[in-house]
Image (tube, rainbow, N blue to C red):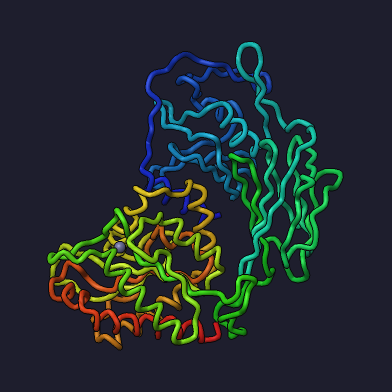
Amino acid sequence: MKRLTIVLAVLAVLLGLRPVAAQTTGTVSFRYAGHVVRAPLFGSRVELVPVFALLGATAKFSPAMGTWGVQLDNHMIQFSPGLRVVLADGKLAEGREAPVASPGGIAASTDFLDSMILSPLGFHLERVADGFRITPGGRRGAPLTVRATAADFSTTTTLVLTMGRPAMAHVNETRPGSVTITMEDASPQLDRATVLRSRRIRGLEPTADGLELSLAPGIGLLSWHALSDPPRVILELGPKAAPPTSAPQAAPARRPTRKGVRPIVIDPGHGGKDSGAVSGSGLEEKNLTLAVARRLARVLRRMGFAVRLTREDDETRALTDRTALANRLDALAFVSLHANASRAASVRGAETYYMSLDSASDATAAAVAKLENAAGSTARSGSELDMILWDMAQAEVLNESAQLALSIQRRLNSLLNLPDRGVKQAPFVVLTGATMPAVLVEVGFLSNPKEARRLADSAYQDQLAGALATGIAEFLRSGR
Ligand SMILES: [Zn+2]
């Protein structure tokens, strides 16, 4: 919950969206338990603060976090102007549109108020002749068709339940291996086309008041979230005991899968229209990363690993597509290659980053992340909520990503006698999507004329590839 709150706050800051409702266009009345308030209207949006007061809820804005928190009984709902994402009792949900800042605090559509705020607080909004009435509880429901799909990853399975219409869902692990999914105002029925293929799911059956999910032995519910458009519930399933991240375990390296061998995915940063950093002599980051990636792939293949590149040529690739490929291939590791730039021409050396959910480990790391993330703004990027979900995918393997980063950085330092710029954490968009250990390596500074000259040299690129390959192989063979 705390982490999600932070993610929400980071998103609010990252997106920097503060749309403001301008002129009021009138007022609308809300009734609850014999009391009435009139709330200002801003076109299709309504001022929310009077409604919170009507319910007796505590509503507070945190300027530091950029988020609103509404508390009633033991419920806590958090949301931000400009964000469609809402955190309701620690669960993420995505509305059809975002609330906006308003003269009275915050304004949103009545649909947002009903489905994203009132419903999790245990209320229901009804349109009446002269405005709206708020009533406790929901409505009894009509049949609702649900389509289920499952995807197995190396340690977890994602189950997606797509609903024929929006309904507030609740997911509970009632006993070990058994999960109940209920949908308010609805009696869910499975789409006849549903065929679940997962080694962690035994079955999914409709019951009197919901769906009953039975899991393979030792598998439990790790987390769940709701999404809209299309409305769906997403369940993360996996080993119930905390997965041993540091304890010795049979190395899953090169375990054969349906598609054969699990590859290492190397991501040559930038490409196509996006050149990345450029040295004084005209060496472009996109060309350097591709050259090093090709060499690295050769070395790793000689070591016996399967390797895939996210791009084979000078092509444009969205940041999110790069990790999507790695996830699709169930990659052993994801390594994104980049070259750095600094305002100080004397700065040199290599840096290895892994994903940070909270904030960058220092101001410089934050600057690097900002630079590399900018490439995503021109390409297609995921929705706000996708970003959070991807973040959480990487959160599960964060320890392993840190180990991979350390292993690579050690090799870069010792083999190349580079000054140690260390392992750092920063919120890189290109790393957020990965469900496997994932790192971003800045192989050197193109802004340093001497280092740029070295980076352009093919013999040096071979050395770099050798150091990277050794670091990656040591990590994969360490029996993590
Ligand atoms: Zn870059």
**Where's the N terminus, which quadrant?**
bottom right
Q: Position of residue 326 (x, y in %)?
A: 50, 66
Residue in view at x 69 percent, y 60 percent: 221
Give residue 87's quadrant in the image: top right
Placement of 97 over or under 130, stated as above or below: below
Give residue 283's quadrant in the image: bottom left
Q: Position of residue 474 (x, y in %)?
A: 45, 86
Asked whether, in this view, residue 296 is left or right of residue 141, the answer is: left
Give residue 294's quadrant in the image: bottom left
- Image quarter for ligand 1 equals bottom left
Viewer can see residue 449: yes
Viewer can see residue 174: no
Residue in view at x 59 percent, y 37 percent: 116
Placement of 285 over or under 135, stated as above or below: below
Asked whether, in this view, residue 410 is left or right of residue 215, the answer is: left
Residue in view at x 59 percent, y 36 percent: 117
Please identify the residue farthest to the front as the structure is shown: 313
Q: Position of residue 292 (x, y in %)?
A: 32, 74
Asked whether, in this view, residue 140 is left or right of residue 457, the answer is: right
Residue in view at x 34 percent, y 55 percent: 373
**Where's the C terminus, which quadrant?**
bottom right
The number of callouts visible is: 0
Please identify the residue farthest to the right as the structure is shown: 208
Asked whether, in this view, residue 338 is left or right of residue 436, the answer is: left
Q: Position of residue 151 (x, y in %)?
A: 65, 60
Placement of 397 over or under 255, stated as above or below: above
